[in-house]
Amino acid sequence: MRVRVATTALGITAALLALPACSTDTTGDKHQPPTATHTGKPAALSSTALESRLLDQGDLGSGYLPKPERPAQHDDVTVIGCPARSELGGDAATGGTLTFPHQAKADFTYGGNSSKISEELYSDSPKKLSDGIDQIFDAMTGCPTYQVVAGGTPIDIASQKLPAPRVGGDEQWSQLLTFTTGGRSTVVKQTAIRDGSLLLIVSGSPAVVDRHLDKALAKATAAS
């Protein structure tokens, strides 16, 4: 199945791990207060509110540097050997179809680019968040091994479902992905936690994700 996706500085890794590639927030949304439910808790947070809940250099500690954002590039991507991924259709085959309207993201490198960590925050109704991320994780872990061809470059991918982290939240997902191309492999851990109307996704080097997951969840949900 061939789809067209946007790849960032991390190349195909970013395209596959940017779960989900959401629609851009509107100006009106950024200045609109969150809607309250009958419990008094906000049903959805604006993108501006989400940005204030992302980890920053002060939270991460010394050695972490913001990763410069580069213009998106569009590559033809073919998914081979994974019907579960192909059945999603369109950009969902590479993990980028959900359109949560409220979003924020931060990327950091550590130790001279040898380790990376990416944090994404999304806000929508609990059911939409749960259904969307559950569908993507099921598809991504449904095939132990498969291949993606991006811009003519073959990338072998191995996926492994991990036990859900016991760090809080209403629902948790976690997986380990190994990308191999040109004889070199990159291992990426990705963990998602839904807490009410907020979804946190942390991706990157396994040790770095484990080190900062608790802190990311605490900051993301501190004012919830």
Image: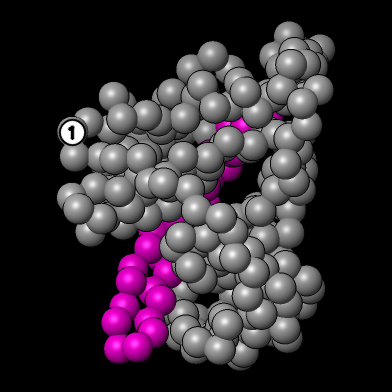
Which residue is depicted at the point 35% across and 88% down?
A: 182
- Specify whether 168 is left or right of 18: left
On the image, numbered disc 1 is attached to which residue?
62
Front-lying residue, 7 or 119: 7
Q: Is residue 192 above or below residue 89?
A: above
Report the magenta stretch's main SS.
strand
Which residue is depicted at the point 48% across and 17% down?
A: 222
Coordinates of residue 80 in the picture (x, y in percent): 62, 89
Q: Is residue 170 visible?
A: no
Q: Residues within 10 Å of mark 1 (few under 14, many from 20)?
A: few
- Specify whether 222 is left or right of 48: left
Q: Is residue 150 above or below residue 132?
A: below
Q: Is residue 72 above or below residue 84?
A: above
Residue type highlighted by circle 1: Ser
Q: Is residue 129 visible?
A: yes
Which residue is farthest top? Answer: 40
Front-lying residue, 102 or 74: 74
Q: Is residue 3 above or below residue 53?
A: below
Which residue is depicted at the point 45% across and 85% down?
A: 156
Coordinates of residue 41 in the picture (x, y in percent): 69, 14
Coordinates of residue 106 in the picture (x, y in percent): 46, 40
Front-lying residue, 193 or 212: 212
Quarter of the N terminus within the rendering = bottom right
- Check residue 55 for magenta coloring: no
Coordinates of residue 54 in the picture (x, y in percent): 47, 30
Quarter of the C terminus within the rendering = top right
Q: Quadrant of residue 176?
A: bottom left
- Specify whether 213 is left or right of 119: left
Q: Mark 1 falls on what kind of element? A: loop
- Check residue 199 for magenta coloring: yes
- Which residue range is magenta in the image? 171-200
